[in-house]
Image: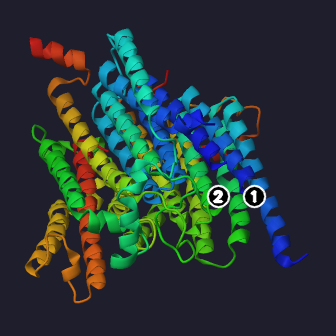
Amino acid sequence: MELLGLYHYWVFAILLMTGFYAVVAKVNLIKKLIGLTLFQAAVFLLYISVGMVEGGDAPIFTADNADSLFSNPLPQVLILTAIVVGISTTALGLAIVVRINEVYGTIEEDEIQEIDRR
Amino acid sequence: MFYAVTIALLATMALALARAIMGPTVYDRVLAVNMIGTKTVLLMSVISFLFGRPDFLDLALVYALINFIGVLAVLEFFRVRAYDRSGDSEADGS
Amino acid sequence: MNLAYLLDILSWILMTAGGFFVFVGGVGALRMPDLYTRMHAASVTDTVGPMLVVAGLLLQSGLSLPSVKLLGILFFLLLTGPTASNALASAALLAGKNPEYARRMDEPADGEKAE
Amino acid sequence: MTVVFSMFLLTLLLITAIAVVHAGNLFVAVMLSGIFSLLLALNFFLLDAADVALTEAAVGAGISTVLFLGALSLTTDREKSPSPHRLLSLAIVAVTTLAVIMGTLDKPSFGDPEAPVQVHVAPWYLETTREAIQIPNVVTAVLSSFRGYDTLGEVFVVFTAGIGVLFLIGRHSGTKPQDIGPPHGEPSGLRHYLIPRLIGRMLVPFIMLFGLYVQFHGEYGPGGGFQAGAIIAASIILYALLEGEKRALQVLPRSVLVGMISGGALLYSAVGVAGMLMGGNFLDYSVLLDDPVKGQQIGIILIEAGVGITVTGVLLSIFHAFAARGRF
């Protein structure tokens, strides 16, 4: 059980690298963007796991949890805004992909480079 | 005893996930997404009682309300694609 | 043997039954042979499962704001679940996927799916 | 027991992520990333982060699927070439994964209340929120008061991303306006699907109402401007899917959306400047009213409103930019 205490972080590591693999190895631009969102999600997960306190409560006061232990609110704040920023930047990436598709007629990276070389 | 329901819901999610990954048609995958959406709503309701924080039912309510949008978007996507490709446009996974 | 105790037992029974139906639906969605039969199995998890689970939770929460929210959740799930299934089935049918196992059944069942 | 549930969900999350990357068809990948988002929200919920789970729910369930499908319908859903350097990348990624896992071995155990992150500023935030701001949701307090600068920056990032999308695909160059829209005079939207349309129309006001509830209840429960903006945008996207994009534009025209994008960000900055004019620091709400606690509360409500307006405007503009390109 001692080692399993780090399971959340291992999941983070594997998830991060799954996203990274999609970004470096895949040729399709939309697939790369999906990989980027996986990468983002892994970072979100890391922050929230770090902020979690065993036996803690969500950091919202109610009438009857005045003196209980609370999880850390700060990572939650950072990630909350990052999720919305993440979808906006993903949309920007998708917009660029759509424009590339209009100009080059393809969204495969190697074909785009082929066209550029001509 | 909330645990029994939670375990049943988690097992069902795993089964639905298996269906989503196996396919074989895209419609099976959409069906699986929809199933997991419903399970998520139920799981969030049960867990918010498990935690003793019923005010977190808001989360389940959000999913109950807007999961539907994804399915409609898929339907619209199929409809648009049916115009684009007059032939058999059924995409298949794997 | 007071009332609260009875209500508790009833709530557990309802929730366990809900969990059972959800699980059965999940197994069906995995094991059934074609898309429409799988949809049929999955619809159990969209209707009976939520009804029983939410009914159990309602007995736990009593008369309060959470129970109003629970009723809202149940209402919207029952509204959107079958609609989504309908939309999906009609999309699949329009794309030319015919139910493979329809001929063994009666004709009205087939007509219903085309709705 | 909760930890076991959490681990199970994390394992499902991993399987989904690998399936997403492995899927050959982009549509399948988008569907699986929908599942990924649901599982991620559940994980956040189990990790005590209700606000974050609500955000992921509001963004992941509706908007991100719609955006990805919109992009797919404008490009293609087939992935053509297999990766050329698959083995090499796989080897590099495996080595890096091992390195990262090595790094985690030095971390304090999961959920340790004595970990360095937990002892530094978090107790101060919890304590000060109780005394100086007096709203129940500490996340909202930190978001909008203690870290107001940070959130202002995030709002401007969202603003910039929205403007960027509008620059890239907001105007349709090349194609004439009459080419846009469905062929053969077919009305756009799901008008022919009677049942989804009826039910969907019933849902639109409820979603919008719930969005407003999340906006104004954000001080007391999970919620706030970011979540509310996403939910309200989702309600209008639902309307656009049902009735066609043009009808949705009649409800909220592009000019209004652009006004919302800049108006929300301006409202946020104006609150900061008002604090300066009344003798405090930038984004110091204590001076807004005579009672510092009331001042903090009114400041938080105002800037949450600004955040909500900007997020709604940006997400809707992005949706319309994609929708107007194709026939989505």
Q: Nearer the viewer, residue D297 or C18?
A: D297
Identified by mark 1, the residue type is Met
From this view, report whether residue D98 is shown above or below residue D218. Answer: above
- State yes or no: discs 2 and 1 in contact (Cβ < 8 Å): yes
Q: Quadrant of residue D264?
A: bottom left
10 Å crowding of disc 2: few (<14), some (14-19), many (20+) = many
Instruction: Count all numbered tags in the image, as a single digit.
Output: 2
In the picture, the disc for residue B61 is none
Tell me the element at label 1.
Answer: helix
In the picture, the disc for residue C15 is 1
Identified by mark 2, the residue type is Val
Q: Are marks 2 and 1 on the same chain?
A: no
Q: Nearer the viewer, residue C69 or D88?
A: D88
Can residue B89 be seen in the rendering of this structure?
no
Q: Which residue sits furthest bottom?
A: D290
- Measured as percent of width and height from the top left, residue C74 is found at 62, 63
From this view, report whether residue B56 is shown above or below residue A93. Answer: below
